[in-house]
Amino acid sequence: MSANIDPHSPLIPAQEMVLPTLQGDGKRRWLNPALATGKYWQRRRLLAYALIAFFVTLPHLRLGGKPVVLLDIVSREFTFLGHTFYPTDSGLLLLVLLTVFFSIMFITAVGGRVWCGWGCPQTVYLEFLFRPIDRLFAGTVGKGGKPRKSLDAALQLGRFAVYLVCSMFLAHTFLSYFIGTDRLAQWMRLYPWQHPTAFGIMAGATAGLMYNFMFFREQLCMVACPYGRLQSVMLDRRSLIVTYDIHRGEPRHKGKAIGESKVGDCIDCGHCTSVCPTGIDIRNGLQMECIHCTQCIDACDAVMGRIGKPQGLIRYSSQDALSGKQHSWIRARTLIYPAMALVTSALFLMLLTTKFAFDARILSAPGAPYAVTATRDLQNNFRVRLRNRSNQEETYSIRMLQPTGASVQWSDVAPTLQPNESKLVPIMIHAPLGITAANHGSVQATVEITDQSGHARQIQLRILGPG
Ligand code: SF4
Ligand code: SF4
């Protein structure tokens, strides 16, 4: 690291490499990776195009009249697969998060950073949209080589313009997950001065994406993404990783072997490092910066083909397999994680199917806690927060299940709610005056609310009266 520092500089050189994209004097080492067009790249490219189509199409898809995915943060409503979740559904949302969490733990324990290298939108867009744009302007498309380091001003301007258009398109796609495609279409039809806030949000998102793909790039994976930071706890010695076979490759040598001395298959050509989008040398072992993009596999396989050696000096393997140990996918974490994901997803589905038609929550009404009517009855007033979660208009009925002798009715007409509508509806409870006398002034009651489709919710409350 000290090689880059001016000997007269007051800077103290770092003792070891802090980041592969950091020079000894703390300046950014800009990466300009070459392209290896081997079999893994071909497969990743196919998947990437399919994923880009999926990411762009998903916010436009609808199920039962609702978006398949809509994360409406402003209204605090999350729609997923045609079901809308509200802040009161924190239990259901927690189960979804736990299912995602256990699934990620499982996938990582088995397949390492397969998500980072093959499915993450950052990798997909950077490697299969923005870097190809760089190659287009550098004139190296189809050659698989290194892009030119510097472009003249006109080419730079052209590249900037294409980046801007792509970033605008991605910003619109990204925001459609949060505002919905209908509102997005409205925004797009208006002039900026007619909706300055919305325009500002879109301009900010475009600028953020532009900055990310033009300048921040691999730094997002290396210093900002929490998933990358958690690798060390999620991987173990049997997880699948992209790795260099040190037993076969070492001692590496440049050119021909001298005399009878044993040499490894690595000819120290540096191709594996020149294609690495995070600037590391896979031959130094498993590193946190490796996103398992497989570019070094493709680069090394091509070199092995040229020198007549078998492919796979760099390959998918595990630390145990490389050190000659028996390899098995089955171990405690690969059994426990999917089991936990199954339990949480089953619980989620059960709650979703049994409790989803409508929400009903009892709230106290303003005023005195109870009243005694002219007919010497006890009267309690409450309010019910009703939310119709179905996709059709519903009218609700209410009845008292217990205690015997008590009754309940809507204070006004039976409420009718449109899909997704929420309403605060007053109710009146009547009970015999002495019902609370033996219970210190209150008695437990159960009320049942039913919609026209036959879904019922039972709610507990306490009838108050003289004790
Ligand atoms: S590409 Fe293969 S042969 Fe070349 S330096 Fe890397 S590991 Fe060695
Ligand atoms: S070391 Fe290989 S797999 Fe890891 S990021 Fe670099 S090129 Fe990709």
Image: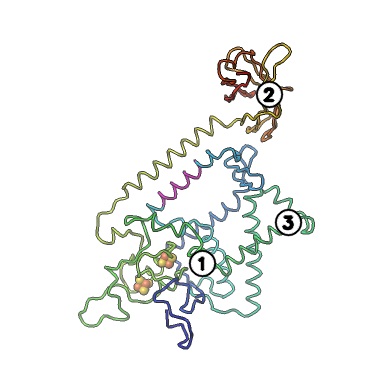
Secondary structure under the numbered disc 2 in the rendered image: strand
Viewer can see residue 303: no
- Residue drawn at x 62%, y 63% is 208
The residue tagged 3 is 197
Figure quadrant of residue 311: bottom left
The residue tagged 2 is 381
Estimate the spatial distance between the alpha carbons at disc 2 and disc 1, rounded to whole Å: 60 Å
Secondary structure under the numbered disc 3 in the rendered image: helix
Q: Which residues are magenta?
A: 95-107
Which secondary structure is most common in the magenta stretch?
A: helix
Q: Are marks 2 and 1 in contact (CB under 8 Å)?
A: no
The residue tagged 1 is 219
Quadrant for the N terminus in the image = bottom left
Estimate the spatial distance between the alpha carbons at disc 1 and disc 3, rounded to whole Å: 30 Å
For the residue carrying disc 2, how many other residues have a C-alpha within 10 Å: few (<14), some (14-19), or many (20+)? Answer: many
Q: Position of residue 347 (x, y in %)?
A: 47, 35
Q: Earlier in the sequence, mark 1 or mark 3?
A: 3
Q: Earlier in the sequence, mark 2 or mark 3?
A: 3
- Residue drawn at x 63%, y 55% is 173
Secondary structure under the numbered disc 1 in the rendered image: helix
Figure quadrant of residue 242: bottom left
- Residue drawn at x 54%, y 64% is 126
Residue 200 higher or lower than 380, as above or below: below
